[in-house]
């Protein structure tokens, strides 16, 4: 792995907002900006959490 330049690091760090993340697109293999999946309430007053490793999905 190569070390990122200052411009590359600023592009990555500066473009990720609250509730966003970077994921790897399975079709192309490129990194893309996605949305974080949050826990959602279930029927019985508990919470349903996303599976580990699947917290970042494409924004819809």
Image (spheres, rainbow, N blue to C red):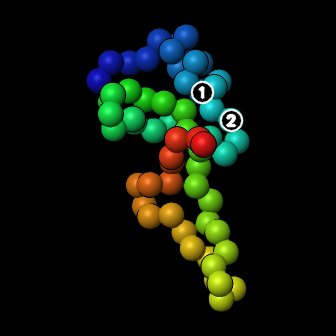
Q: Mark 1, mark 2: which one is toward the viewer?
A: 2
- Percent position (x, y) of residue 29? 32, 30
Q: Name the residue under label 1.
A: 13
Q: Residues within 10 Å of mark 2 (few under 14, many from 20)?
A: few
Q: Residue at x 40, y 36 (%)?
A: 24
- Percent position (x, y) of residue 23? 45, 38
The quadrant the N terminus occupies is top left
Residues at marks 1 and 2, CA–CA distance in whole angstroms: 9 Å
Q: Which residue lies furthest to the bottom in this view?
A: 44
The disc label shown at residue 17, or none: 2
Q: Residue at x 33, y 28 (%)?
A: 28
Q: Residue furthest front?
A: 60
Q: What element carries label 1?
A: helix
- Percent position (x, y) of residue 38? 62, 59
Q: Which residue lies furthest to the left in this view?
A: 1
Q: How crowded is mark 1: few (under 14 residues within 10 Å), some or many (20 or more)?
A: few
Q: Which residue is drawn at 50% across and 54% down?
A: 55
In the picture shown, does residue 50 fall above or below 59?
below
């Amino acid at each position: 792995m190569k070390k990122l330049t200052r411009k590359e690091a600023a592009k990555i760090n500066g473009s990720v907002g609250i509730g966003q993340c970077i994921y790897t697109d399975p079709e192309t293999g490129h990194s893309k900006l996605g949305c974080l999946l949050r826990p959602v309430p279930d029927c019985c007053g508990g919470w349903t959490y996303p599976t580990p490793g699947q917290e970042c999905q494409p924004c819809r």
